[in-house]
Amino acid sequence: MTTRTLPMRGRSGRTPARRLRTLWDASPLTYLTLIAALALSIFPIYWMIVVATRTNDVVSDVPPPVLPGGKLGDNVSRLFGTEDVYFAKGLINSFIASGAVTISTVFFASLAGFAFAKLRFRGKNGLLLTIIATMMIPVQMGIVPLYMIMVELGWQNQLQAVIVPFLVTGFGVFMMRQYADQAVPDELIEAARVDGCTTFGIYWRVVLPALRPAAGVLGLFTFMQTWNEFMWPLAVLTPDNPTVQLSINNLANAYFKDYTLMFAGTTIAILPLLVVFVVFGRQIIGGIMEGAIKA
C-alpha cells in the first residue's frame, strides 16, 4: 500500500508555502505606502548629508538642495580643527564606552539568561521578578542617586562613569532568558553533563553558540543605545572629555551655529551605526525570523 505525506498545515489550515505566497501577494497600494514611508524616513538623513557637503547658504533655501556639493572635505577638516569641541576625542570615547558596554552586556546577560532558563537554584523566580521590576523604573529617576555614587567613587569626568553602571541590563537578561528557554533543549545540557562538562563549560560550548542570533541582536541594540546616549554623559562628563553626542551638542550650543559643521559631525557619528547594521544586518534578520518561527 502506498502512503502519501500530506503537507504540514498550521492552525489556520494553510500550508507554509501558501502562507508565504499570501505575504507576497500584496496590493499596489501597499507597496506605494511603504515606498512613501521609506522616502519620508530617508529624506531628512539625505538632506543632512547634502548640507554637510555644502555651505551655510543652502540651509534656508526653498526648495532644499537635493544634490551633494564639494565642501565635505573642508567641513570635516574644520570640524576636527574646531577648538572646544574635541570631536576626535569624543569619537574615541564613544567607541571605547560602546564596545565595552556591548561586550559586557552580551556576556553577562547570556550567562544570567542561561542560569534563569536552565539551572535550578533557590530564589530563582524572585530574582527574575526583581530583574524585571528594574525595567519598570524610568532611567531619569536613577540619575541623581547614580551621580551621587559617582561623586563618592571619584569618577566624575572619567570614562568608567559612563561604562560601569551599564555593564548589564535587565532587558538583556530577560531577553536571553526567554531565548535560551526555547533554543536550548534540556536533553542537550544533560548530555553535556554526562560527558563531564562543567556548568561554565556547558554555557561556553553548548549554550552560547545556540544563543548567537539573540546575542547578535542584543549586542547591536546595546551598541546603538550606548552610542546615542546623551543625558547621562552630559551629567557626569565635562566638555573637555566628551562622547561624540556631547561634541555635537557643543557645536549646537555655539554663539554662531554652523550647520555645516553640525551636520558633518552628525554624518560622521552615524557612520559607525550604519557599518554595524551592514555587517551584522543578516544576524539581526536571522535572529528575528528564528524567534518568529519558534513562536
Image (cartoon, grey):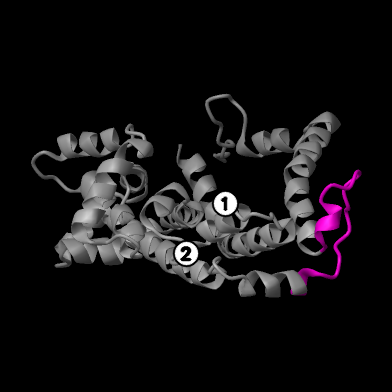
Q: Is residue 162 magenta?
A: no
Instruction: Choose mark 1 or mark 2, whichever is in front.
Output: 2
- Asked whether 198 or 248 is in front, the reply is 248
What mark, if any, has residue 94 been given in the picture?
2
Q: Tag 1's secondary structure?
A: helix
Query: Which amino acid type is marked by label 2?
Result: Ser
**Quarter placement of the N terminus:** top right
- Quarter of the image holding residue 120? top left
What mark, if any, has residue 123 been given in the picture?
none
Farthest residue, direction left: 122
Q: x, y percentage for residue 171?
A: 36, 43
Q: x, y percentage for residue 149?
A: 22, 51
Q: Residue at x 65, y 34 (%)?
A: 19
What mark, if any, has residue 285 been given in the picture?
1
Magenta residue span: 54-73
Q: x, y percentage for residue 274?
A: 62, 60
Q: Residue at x 52, y 68 (%)?
A: 91
Query: Which amino acid type is marked by label 1?
Result: Ile
Q: Is residue 68 magenta?
A: yes
- Quarter of the image holding residue 267? bottom right
- Asked whether 229 or 109 is in front, the reply is 229
Q: Tag 2's secondary structure?
A: helix
Q: Residues within 10 Å of mark 1 (few under 14, many from 20)?
A: few
Q: Residue at x 47, y 57 (%)?
A: 223
